[in-house]
Image (cartoon, coloured by chain):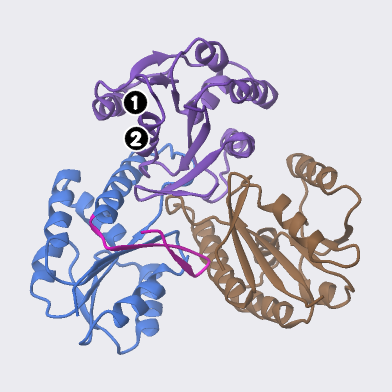
Chain colours: A blue, B brown, C purple
């Protein structure tokens, strides 16, 4: 099975995660790896995580890594689903890393000869927020989504649970 | 004429409503029913309603129902345009109903042998809001849009007045 | 070369500007004109402008006009890229102009026998903002995007750097 890279982008609760999971399962000979990037967990987050875990049942191995995506993925011997890049950006910002470091990390992952599926929130289609950090997040997220999409073999945009292939 | 279900999803002022009206008129042998879900009306809302009424002129019968969609639609003897599901979600939340009740109500509507056209705002492509209620609204809206889309024969995504069929 | 009108719409940092630049260069026999609409410049804005300038290098003539698009464009003897309509709407609102004046201005531009490429932020896919001015901006932006798209020969929606032709 030839390795490939894919990006699933869409709004909050658009259904991109479920479709990315189905896609990853189809594109893996062995049990794929679910790379959970969540670092900061409050009650609300925990409920989301539990709902997600239930959703993917026993079909994935779960691996937790909030920051060092390359280090984690390079050791994986199966397809990897990164859930999700948006939370990873958040973690990186929190730990003082900027766009250039995120770019380098993602470029290293994109260069691996492994099947990697990226999930990312589309956050740029609302009104420009007054909050400077929110604007910075949108900027970085947008630029990284372009970077990932440019190197992916397939890109899917999800609305109302429907994933349309746009590349 | 075989009955069918359709969903028009898109951002605020994307033009989804006008295209949904045209679609409903085309898919109705008799004068179709415009199911207005608006319950809370301030001056700004009134202006929007007046503009919408002018837009659809005398081509629709108007029926007002803020909550009980199934009860209202089951009595209709023509195609029904629900304008809009987003406002209905808002009403349901205000009256203390949760996701499960909304899901049941919509599933009942989707099971009717009637042509029903759903209009829904795409609200999940901005930055995640700090306001908890706003996040809850986005979550419910996203999950219900997936539920509706899964049961619809046709789904349209509207940008800049252009409705693209995505299912 | 027959003149034409095109619209590039997409979220913040979706990559629409770069693709609109490439499109304008392809659809111009002479060096095209970059019509910069920015009027109010703070440090953050200046950085964005510098990044944009660097991006388009020496391939465009730059013309600055925050308000009177028709007057500026009617004198141009090459293809024009308006970067961007969203900032122009902002300027017009600031100077007390309303939707009707913006509509008239754009209709005059759309009627010109010149190649004009419009760039516009898609701002309507987040939660409806509490701020009244933000809602007004979304409304005007949405209605004008419909107006522009209706008169354009080609419309492109950009996500993650990928511009899909939707008209």
The answer to whether residue C9 is above or below residue B25 is above
Q: Residue at x 15, y 44 (%)?
A: A100
Question: Between residues B163 and C39, which one lies in front from this camera angle?
Answer: B163
Whole-percent x, y for residue C50 in the image: 26, 24
Question: Between residues A130 and A104, which one lies in front from this camera angle?
Answer: A104
The residue singled out by tag 1 in the image is: C45
Quadrant of the rendered structure where residue B148 is? Answer: bottom right
Q: Residue at x 52, y 30 (%)?
A: C4
Q: Which residues are magenta?
A: A151-167
Sequence order check, earlier mark of 2 and 1: 2
Asked whether, in this view, residue B109 is left or right of residue C116, the answer is right
The answer to whether residue A59 is above or below residue B1 is below
The residue singled out by tag 2 in the image is: C22
Whole-percent x, y for residue B51 in the image: 79, 41
* Crowd around label 2: few <14 · some 14–19 · many ≥20 (10 Å): few
Asked whether, in this view, residue A124 is left or right of residue B70, the answer is left
Q: Chain of mark 2?
A: C
Q: Residue at x 33, y 47 (%)?
A: A142
Indicate the secondary structure of the residue bearing disc 1: helix
Asked whether, in this view, residue B13 is left or right of residue C91, the answer is right
Indicate the secondary structure of the residue bearing disc 2: helix
Q: Is residue A165 magenta?
A: yes
């Amino acid at each position: 099975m030839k390795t490939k890279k894919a990006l699933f982008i869409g709004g909050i609760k658009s259904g991109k995660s479920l479709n990315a999971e189905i896609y990853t399962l189809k594109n893996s000979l062995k049990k794929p790896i679910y790379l959970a990037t969540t670092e900061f967990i409050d009650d609300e987050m925990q409920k989301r995580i539990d709902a997600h875990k239930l959703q993917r049942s026993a079909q994935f191995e779960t691996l937790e890594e909030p920051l060092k995506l390359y280090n984690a993925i390079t050791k994986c011997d199966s397809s990897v689903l990164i859930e999700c890049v948006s939370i990873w950006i958040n973690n990186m910002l929190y730990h003082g890393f900027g766009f250039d470091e995120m770019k380098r990390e993602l470029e290293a992952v994109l260069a691996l000869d492994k099947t990697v599926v990226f999930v990312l929130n589309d956050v740029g289609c609302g009104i420009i927020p007054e909050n400077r950090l929110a604007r910075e997040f949108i900027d970085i997220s947008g630029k990284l989504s372009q970077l990932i999409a440019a190197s992916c073999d397939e890109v899917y945009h999800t609305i109302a649970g429907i994933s349309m292939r746009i590349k």
